[in-house]
Amino acid sequence: MTATPPPDVLPATPTAPVVDEPEDTHPDVEGVVVSRTAIAGKIKELAAAISRDYAGKDVLLVGVLKGAVMVMADLSRELDLRVEMDFMAVSSYGSSTSSSGVVRILKDLDRDVTGQHVIVVEDIIDSGLTLSWLLRNLHSRNPASVEVVALLRKPDALKVEVPVRYVGFDIPNEFVVGYGLDYAGHYRTLRFVGRLRPEVIAAG
């Protein structure tokens, strides 16, 4: 049984079949899930919504390493706000293609977030287990507010309901790489999001 995602302030865009663009190719990828052009357009849309909602406020973006680096870099440049950035690192997939739900902080924030408007930046939400824990942890530090922006979400993979204010795309429950998402440390720098060929995953 999967959890039902709560309503988004900025509704997610369901992904549709896309025509591969010339730059959206890699020999290990068998299909594009979200194109480079679609990502760029969605980042601008998310940034516009955040800039509108936080007008006149200072914002602290908290990127969840390592996957959120690409999203956070591009999003921050599109925001029309006074923005500071910090990072947290938690236990990740390693070479696995599914989340264990086990949370371990590898790097904590470098600053006190008391009284600050915090926006957690995620590349993807699948089970929601790690993010749920992370939000509880951040709320315990007495910020003014905590919200989440995620480029991708897998509704069919959710195990817990997680309040996500801004979502880019809802995608099928399949393993994807690119734009920060990796497999065994590789493919993060692809400018699009795509499916790995089964033989690549089988080879480990």
Image (tube, rainbow, N blue to C red):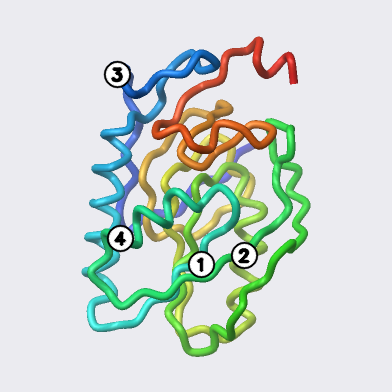
- Name the secondary structure under disc 4: helix
Q: Which residue is mark 1?
A: 62
Between discs 1 and 2, the one toward the N terminus: 1
Mark 1 or 3, closer to the camera: 3
Between discs 1 and 3, the one toward the N terminus: 3
Identity of the amino acid at label 3?
Answer: Pro
Identity of the amino acid at label 2?
Answer: Met
Q: Could you say where residue 158 lies in the image, as x and y percent from the top left?
A: 58, 43
Separation of marks 3 and 2 at Cα, in angstroms: 34 Å
Identity of the amino acid at label 1?
Answer: Val
Q: Could you say where residue 150 lies in the image, as x and y percent from the top left?
A: 44, 51
* Label 1 crowd bin: few (<14), some (14–19), many (20+), radius 10 Å: many
Q: Could you say where residue 127 lies in the image, as x and y percent from the top left?
A: 62, 44
Mark 3 or 2, closer to the camera: 3
Task: Look at the numbered discs 3 and 2 and tell me whether their residues touch, using CB distance below 8 Å.
Answer: no
Separation of marks 1 and 3 at Cα, in angstroms: 33 Å
Quadrant for the C terminus, please: top right
